[in-house]
C-alpha cells in the first residue's frame, strides 16, 4: 500500500490545474459513489486528480489505478477497509474496468463502509446494470466526452469563450464573442483537437494506439469475447471509416468481416459505446437503441483523419462535427427532410454555397454552413456549434 501512496502523490504533484474540463463543474462530488465513464484519452484521470488537488486534503485520499500489479494479490474491498482503519475518507479508482468483479466489490464497499466516498473512472462500455451487482441505484455516473471546439480554444490557444446553449446559438448570441479568426483554428481542431493529449508529441501514433486498445482489449473484455474478436472489430471500423456516413447493410457487413448477421447490431453498439462511432437514429424509439439506424458516422473528426487517411470527405467531416458537438447537450435524431432534427428544429449542414431547399417545409429550419464566420437570418456558422459545452 505504501507504494500505491508514493505513486499517487507523484501523480498529484504533476497534475496541471490551469484548465478544467466542462464536466468538472457538473459533477456532484458529494455522492458516495461517483462514476466517470468515457472513451480512452479524453481526460478522466486528470479530472479526478484535479479534484483531489483542488478540493481535498491529499492525506485523506488514495488514488489508485485498478490495473496496478498490487491488485494481482489484493482486493479493492480489503484496500477500502485499510483506508477506513486509517481514518481516510476518499478512494479514487482509475480504469476500474481492468479489475475483475469491480461492480460486486464496489457494492460491498458502499454497503460496509458508509464513511468512505468512492470516485471511479472506466471505459465508456461499462454497464452498471450488468450482472447481479446492480450499481445503478448506488452510483451516480457521468459521461466525459472529448474536447469541444470551445475547450480546444482554451487549452490549445489560450482563448476563452463562454459556452452557449442551443437556444443561444440559434438566437445568434455567439456573434457577441468577437472571436477573431475562428476559422484559423477550426481546421486544426478538426484534425487534432478532440483529444487533450494532442498537446503532447506523437499524437497520430497515440491515437492509433487508443483505437487498437479499445477494439482489441476494452470491448472483448467487457463483452466476454475471445481476443480474436478485436481483429473483426478493427476490420469493421476500417470499413465504416471509408464508407461513412452510410446506412449499414448488416448482412453484407457480416459477410465481409466473417461474423454472424444476428450479432452485428450488438457489435455496432459496443463500438459506439466505446467512442469509435456514432449512430444516428430516427424518432421511432424513446429508449436508446430502439430507434432505427439511419446513418453511421465515425465518432469524431480526429478519427476521420486517422482512419480515412487520404479519403477524407468534407461533407462527412462537417456532419460528423455537428453531431459530435451538439449530442453532448441535446438529443439528436435524423430528419426526414434534412440532415438532423433536435426537437422542433431542423438543421441542414453544408458548405458556403448550401441552399435552403431542404428546410423549406421545416417547422423551424436552419442552414449550418462551413467556412463562414457570421450568421445571416437562419444561416448559422458551423463552428458556433462547437461552443455548445
Image: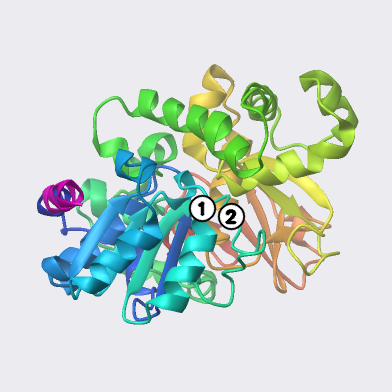
Q: Is residue 4 magenta?
A: yes
Gap between marks 1 and 2 measured at Cα = 5 Å
Q: Is residue 363 magenta?
A: no
Report x, y in % for residue 65: 32, 48
* Residue drawn at the location 83% of the way across and 27% of the way down: 254
Report x, y in % for residue 176: 34, 70
299 over 134 or under it: above or below: above
Q: Quadrant of residue 281?
A: bottom right
Q: In which quarter of the image is residue 341?
A: bottom right
Q: Which of 307 and 276 is in front in this view?
A: 276
Q: Are circles 1 and 2 on residues that touch, CB within 8 Å? A: yes
329 over 240 or under it: above or below: below
Q: First in sequence: mark 1 or mark 2?
A: 2
Task: Write the start and end of the magenta stretch as one range.
Answer: 1-10
Q: Mark 1 points at which residue?
A: 382
Q: In this view, does 228 lie to the left or right of 362?
A: left
Report x, y in % for residue 141: 49, 68
327 over 363 or under it: above or below: above
Quarter of the image where the C terminus is located: bottom left
Q: Mark 2 points at which residue?
A: 368
Q: Is mark 1 on a helix, strand or loop?
A: helix
Q: In which quarter of the image is residue 87?
A: bottom left
Q: In this view, does 207 lie to the left or right of 103?
A: left
Q: Is residue 312 visible from the viewing direction of this image?
A: yes
* Residue drawn at the location 58% of the way across and 77% of the way down: 137
Q: What element carries label 2?
A: strand
Within 10 Å of the Cα at label 1, are there few (<14), some (14-19), or many (20+) other Cα atoms? many
Q: Is residue 343 left or right of residue 122?
A: right
Amino acid at each position: 500500500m505504501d507504494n500505491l501512496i508514493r505513486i499517487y502523490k507523484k501523480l498529484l504533484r504533476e497534475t496541471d490545474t490551469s484548465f478544467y474540463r466542462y464536466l468538472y463543474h457538473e459533477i456532484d462530488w458529494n455522492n458516495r459513489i461517483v462514476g466517470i465513464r468515457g472513451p480512452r484519452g479524453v481526460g478522466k484521470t486528470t479530472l479526478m486528480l484535479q479534484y483531489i488537488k483542488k478540493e481535498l486534503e491529499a492525506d485523506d485520499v488514495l488514488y489508485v489505478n485498478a490495473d496496478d500489479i498490487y491488485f494481482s494479490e489484493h482486493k479493492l474491498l480489503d484496500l477500502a477497509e485499510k483506508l477506513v482503519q486509517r481514518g481516510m475518507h476518499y478512494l479514487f479508482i482509475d480504469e476500474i474496468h481492468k479489475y475483475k468483479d469491480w461492480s460486486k466489490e464496489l457494492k460491498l464497499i458502499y454497503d460496509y463502509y458508509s464513511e468512505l466516498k468512492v470516485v471511479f473512472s472506466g471505459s465508456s462500455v461499462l454497464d452498471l446494470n450488468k450482472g447481479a451487482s446492480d450499481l445503478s441505484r448506488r452510483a451516480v455516473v457521468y459521461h466525459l466526452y472529448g474536447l469541444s471546439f470551445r475547450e480546444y480554444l482554451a487549452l490549445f490557444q489560450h482563448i476563452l469563450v463562454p459556452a452557449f446553449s442551443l437556444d443561444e446559438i440559434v438566437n445568434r448570441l455567439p456573434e457577441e464573442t468577437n472571436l477573431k479568426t475562428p476559422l484559423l483554428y477550426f481546421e486544426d481542431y478538426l484534425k487534432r483537437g478532440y483529444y487533450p493529449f494532442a498537446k503532447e508529441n506523437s499524437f497520430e501514433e497515440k491515437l492509433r494506439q487508443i483505437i487498437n486498445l479499445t477494439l482489441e482489449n476494452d470491448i472483448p473484455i467487457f463483452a466476454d469475447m475471445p481476443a480474436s474478436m478485436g481483429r473483426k472489430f478493427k476490420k469493421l471500423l476500417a470499413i465504416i471509416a471509408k464508407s461513412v456516413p452510410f446506412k449499414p447493410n448488416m448482412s453484407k457487413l457480416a459477410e465481409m468481416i466473417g461474423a454472424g448477421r444476428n450479432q452485428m447490431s450488438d457489435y455496432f453498439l459496443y463500438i459506439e459505446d466505446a467512442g469509435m462511432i456514432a449512430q444516428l437514429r430516427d424518432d421511432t424509439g424513446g429508449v436508446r437503441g430502439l430507434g432505427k439506424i439511419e446513418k453511421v458516422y465515425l465518432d469524431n473528426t480526429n478519427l476521420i483523419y486517422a482512419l480515412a487517411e487520404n479519403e477524407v470527405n468534407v461533407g462527412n467531416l462537417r456532419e460528423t462535427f455537428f453531431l459530435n458537438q451538439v449530442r453532448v447537450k441535446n438529443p439528436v435524431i435524423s430528419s426526414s427532410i434534412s440532415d438532423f432534427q433536435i426537437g422542433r428544429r431542423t438543421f441542414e449542414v453544408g458548405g458556403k454555397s448550401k441552399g435552403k431547399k431542404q428546410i423549406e417545409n421545416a417547422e423551424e429550419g436552419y442552414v449550418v454552413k462551413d467556412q463562414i464566420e457570421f450568421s445571416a437570418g437562419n444561416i448559422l456558422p458551423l463552428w458556433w456549434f462547437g461552443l455548445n459545452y
